[in-house]
Amino acid sequence: MTPSIDSMTTQLLSLALDASSLRHQAIAHNLANTGTEGFHPVAVSFEDQLTRLKRELETGHPVQTTLLQGVRPVLQQTAQASEGVASPQELDELTVQLAGNTMHYQALLKGLNKHMSLMSIAINEGKR
Amino acid sequence: MDYRNAFAISASGMTVEKLRLETIATNMANMHAVAGADGRLYRPLRVMTTEVQGGFHRQFNQGLEALQGTRAVVVESNAKPRAVYDPGHPAANPEGYVQYPGVNQVTEMVNMISALRAYEANVVAMNAAKSMAMKALEIGGNT
């Protein structure tokens, strides 16, 4: 895709959408295993990969898409799991995470929608 | 304060109410347990909840992101054991009384109902927060 209007936004939004749907799978996996002995919950690492991007934004300069290179949502064991502590999560804690993630996904979709509608206004030369 | 914080607070409330229900169930299960071989009688458990870092109002005013809801700890209560006169019981003391845990069944039932209602109230609060966030997404109409 050719560098279109503000491709940084579309790229970041679609990465965040990928992260959100992967997070849904992780939560569903944890939900399915609430009764399993010695189960290690999984989580998704994505936001912590964006620290370089955040620092660059704070300087006030427009950011380049090269900063997104190598940033990918990835499944990993939670911190407790790496210490060897097995703790399947509670049902209500997982339901709350699910609700929060769904909200986040819808907000991201809305953002992407509005961003694309800007492009369609440009294409239609301001006519609706 | 974003919606995820509101969810986390309700979640901590729900966890505490579930803990309360577990202690009530334990008390009811051990209502008629006499002292074991070590002579220790079962003492009824209670859940004590305390604020985290005293002063919720201070945290709200600071707009602190990490509001942590409540912190709960399970303690043994000092309820007096019930003494029942039953000389033929194997565990009766020399005067003929058997010691049972001081679990008041009526109190436990009432606590159970209030824990259930508090749990429902937390769920309602969470649903309200979710509705607010959904409504916020409708700003600007459908384009």
Image (spheres, grey):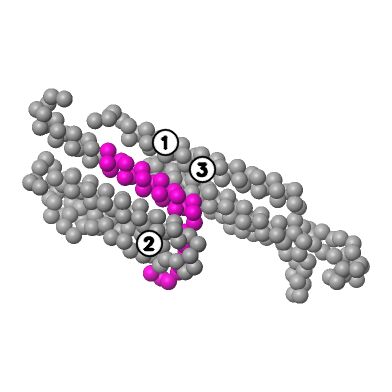
Classify residue B106 as left or right of residue A110: right
Label 1: few (<14), some (14–19) or many (≥20) C-alpha neighbours in 10 Å: some
The image quarter in which residue B113 lies: top right
Magenta stretch holds residue A51: no
Q: Secondary structure at mark 1?
A: helix
Q: Mark 2 vs mark 3: same chain?
A: no
Q: Residue at x 11, y 29 (%)?
A: A124
Q: Which residue is mark 1?
A: B131
Specify the amino acid type for callout 2.
Val
Label 2: few (<14), some (14–19) or many (≥20) C-alpha neighbours in 10 Å: some
Classify residue A53 as left or right of residue B141: left
Q: What range is drawn magenta here?
A: A82-110
Tell me the subunit letter for badge 3: B
Magenta stretch holds residue A101: yes
Q: Which mark is residue A42?
A: 2
Q: Residue at x 66, y 56 (%)?
A: B25
